[in-house]
Structures are given as C-alpha cells and as structure tokens.
Amino acid sequence: MGHLSTHVLDTMNGCPAAGMRVTLQRIDDAGAHTLKALTLNADGRNPDGPLLDAAGMAVGRYRLLFEVAPYFRARGVVLPEPAFLDLVQLDFGIADAAGHYHVPLLVSPWSYSTYRGS
C-alpha cells in the first residue's frame, strides 16, 4: 500500500526541524488545494504518521510548503528582512498511487536539498 511522508533535518544545527510548519497541497487545473497543515514533531516528522495513507494516495501533482524562516527565527537565528529562504515550495508528482513516496528536506537558512527517498 502506498503512502506519502516527509522528514525535515536542520543542517545548520544538526538536528530534526522540530516545530517547523508544513502544508501539503494537491495541484489541479483549478489551482492548489490544501489537504493538510501540520507542525513537525521532535523527530522532524508528521506526528500523525504519513501525510497521505493508502486510502488518500492518488496520482497527480502535489506541493509541500515548508515554513523555513519562521522556524529558524523561532530558534533564535537572526535573519535579514526579507529572509533569503522564507517558504520553501516543493512541487512533485505521484505517478503510482500504490508507491511509497518519501520527500525529505535538508535545510539551513541559506540552502536546501531534497530527493525522493524510500
């Protein structure tokens, strides 16, 4: 059974991004529709498990929005205004609703990287 998950690691501090706000959206011809908004737990993951479980998985376009600048400001990092990275937007596709899609984010106030994990 397929599912969608994410995991955020704070590479500036060398720890999970506990407390970061994340929004999951579905994108279609009418625009972006919010499916879920959450705050990451102490492990940098959704406290409720997968973002989409097998019943919620569907082929299509999706977007994850990571509130990077508010997270780092809450940790006491002094950022310029505007911040270099504020909201990191990752658009991706789910081509196989039975597949496992893991979308990790490695982030600092100045850079980020992602990939399709397992």
Image (cartoon, grey):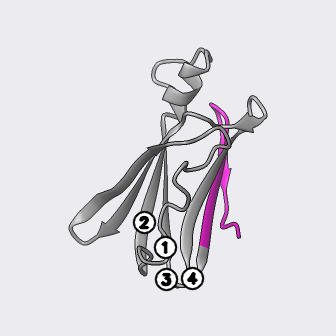
Q: Is residue 64 above or below residue 13?
A: below
Going by the picture, which residue comes out furthest to the right? 14
Q: Which residue is mark 4?
A: 1
Q: Which residue is mark 3?
A: 97
- SS state under label 1: strand
- Separation of disc 1 and disc 4 at Cα? 17 Å
At x 54% / y 20%, what residue is drawn?
Answer: 74
- Near mark 2 (Cα within 10 A), the count class, few <14, some 14-19 or many ≥20, is many
Q: Which residue is mark 2?
A: 62
- Separation of disc 3 and disc 4 at Cα? 8 Å
Viewer-proximal residue among 53 and 7: 53
Quarter placement of the N terminus: bottom right
105 within the magenta span: yes
- SS state under label 2: strand
Q: Earlier in the sequence, mark 3 or mark 2?
A: 2
Q: Which residues are magenta?
A: 101-118
- The amino acid type found where label 4 is placed reads Met
At x 75% / y 35%, what residue is drawn?
Answer: 15
